[in-house]
Image (cartoon, helix red, strand yellow):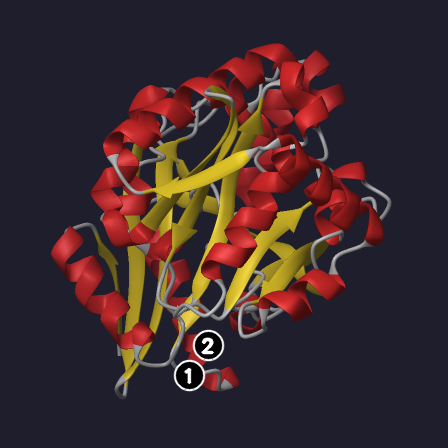
């Protein structure tokens, strides 16, 4: 029995291959995906535990905690943007407990204080997070479309409003094309940034062109860009991430000037119809902007499928005393941020 940190991409890929055999693989767990999301002073790592031929694996991004009140450097981790968390080839309680104990030992040896995990709605990997080690929080419902249906079945399950919007876009002559090349990524990057500027979005929603161009590092089979046009004008686009079983509606954007041409409706319809009959089991549209079941974005996505999954997140503490010390220092030093972000787990990251 052993637990260790993996940083070499080859070792990372080899470990993931064991999970592919039991249906627990996805693009969000790859080293190349983690590398896309590195912030300042962050490093991609994964924890690997092995016992009696069974494996436990979790990728994360680790970084130093900015807290002068501590006598030595301390660190935390967070799963990359999207869906991640632990994978395990065995769900036996004893195995999972030993894996988390090993993770705790490795964390304390390296002075890693805590970690935040965005769990995977389709893999339902909250089951690999025992209550004794992780606080799992149900956050919100997400919308899922099973891809083993016929186009007619999918269309019949659209809401009436969604069908009307799609008909409107078709009648207007809106066209959607799918591509998997660098130029398509560049085009999507531009329309995405323009839309974020329109919205006055927070800095965290801006990824930069380099982020989108590096999607090519995942391989052509791992992404697809859909672009909506009308009479030569680009209306919007969607970036879909693909793995062996799943398709994820990762990011999308459209320009407000073209809302009357319903590009968002046309994009989701085109993606759904394009992926039917392929190797993927489900298309994950994601959830709303908030956990509110009446959230307008959730309602919009729900117009494409009655199926639901649940997004959860996990909060892990390896060193409760140091965590409290960091949070207390932060609240005293940054009272305005504490009032705004005090309910977040990694609250001290906000200044």
Front in this rendered view, residue 238 or 231:
231
Kindly tell me whether residue 36 is visible in this rendering: yes
Relative placement, left or right, of 256 versus 83 is right
CA gap between label 2 and label 1 equals 8 Å
The kind of secondary structure element at disc 2 is helix
Q: Is residue 323 above or below residue 66?
A: below
Residue drawn 44% across and 27% down? Answer: 70
The kind of secondary structure element at disc 1 is loop
Front in this rendered view, residue 183 or 12:
183
Residue drawn 32% across and 44% down? Answer: 34
Where residue 15 appears, x then y in whole percent?
23, 68
Q: Quadrant of residue 225?
A: top left
Front in this rendered view, residue 52 or 214:
214
Q: Is residue 256 above or below residue 91?
A: above
Q: Is residue 88 above or below residue 286?
A: below
The residue indicated by pointer 1 is: 90
Q: Which numbered dot is residue 96?
A: 2
Where residue 266 appears, x then y in whole percent?
61, 40
Front in this rendered view, residue 185 or 70:
185
- Callout 2 touching callout 1 (CB < 8 Å): yes
Residue drawn 39% across and 37% down? Answer: 75
Where residue 325 appears, x then y in whole percent?
57, 33
Relative placement, left or right, of 303 versus 189 is right
Relative placement, left or right, of 159 versus 280 is right
Residue drawn 56% across and 56% down? Answer: 284
Q: Is residue 267 above or below residue 54?
A: above
Which is nearer the N-term, disc 2 or disc 1? 1
Rendered-image quadrant of the C terminus: top right
Rendered-image quadrant of the N terminus: bottom left
How crowded pointer 1 is (Cα within 10 Å; few <14, some 14-19, many 20+) is rated as some
């Amino acid at each position: 029995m052993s637990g260790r940190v993996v940083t070499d991409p080859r070792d990372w890929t080899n470990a993931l291959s064991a999970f592919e055999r039991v249906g627990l693989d996805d693009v969000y767990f790859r080293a190349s995906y983690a590398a896309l999301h590195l912030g300042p002073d962050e490093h991609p790592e994964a924890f690997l535990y092995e016992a009696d031929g069974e494996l436990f694996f979790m990728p994360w991004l680790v970084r130093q905690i900015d807290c002068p009140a501590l006598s030595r450097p301390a660190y935390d981790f967070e799963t990359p943007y999207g869906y991640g968390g632990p994978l395990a080839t065995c769900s036996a309680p004893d195995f999972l407990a030993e894996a988390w104990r090993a993770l705790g030992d490795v964390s304390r040896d390296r002075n890693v204080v805590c970690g935040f995990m965005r769990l995977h709605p389709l893999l339902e990997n909250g089951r690999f997070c025992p209550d004794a080690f992780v606080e799992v929080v149900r956050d919100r419902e997400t919308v899922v479309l099973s891809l083993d249906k016929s186009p007619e079945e999918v269309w019949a399950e659209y809401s009436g409003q969604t069908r009307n919007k799609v008909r409107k876009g078709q009648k207007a002559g809106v066209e959607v094309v799918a591509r998997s090349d660098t130029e398509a990524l560049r085009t999507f990057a531009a329309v995405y940034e323009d839309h974020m500027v329109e919205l006055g979005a927070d800095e965290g929603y801006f990824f930069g062109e380099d982020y989108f161009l590096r999607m090519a590092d995942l391989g052509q089979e791992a992404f697809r860009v859909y672009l909506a046009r009308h009479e030569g004008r680009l209306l919007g686009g969607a970036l879909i991430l693909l793995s062996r079983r799943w398709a994820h509606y990762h990011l999308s954007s459209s320009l407000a000037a073209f809302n009357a041409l319903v590009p968002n409706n046309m994009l989701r319809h085109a993606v759904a119809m394009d992926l039917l009959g392929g190797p993927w089991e489900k298309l994950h549209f994601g959830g709303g902007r908030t956990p509110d079941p009446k959230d307008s974005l959730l309602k919009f996505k729900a117009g494409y499928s009655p199926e639901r999954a649940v997004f959860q997140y996990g909060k892990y503490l390896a060193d409760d005393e140091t965590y409290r010390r960091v949070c207390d220092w932060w609240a005293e030093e940054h009272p305005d941020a504490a009032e705004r972000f005090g309910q977040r787990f990694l609250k001290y990251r906000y200044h």
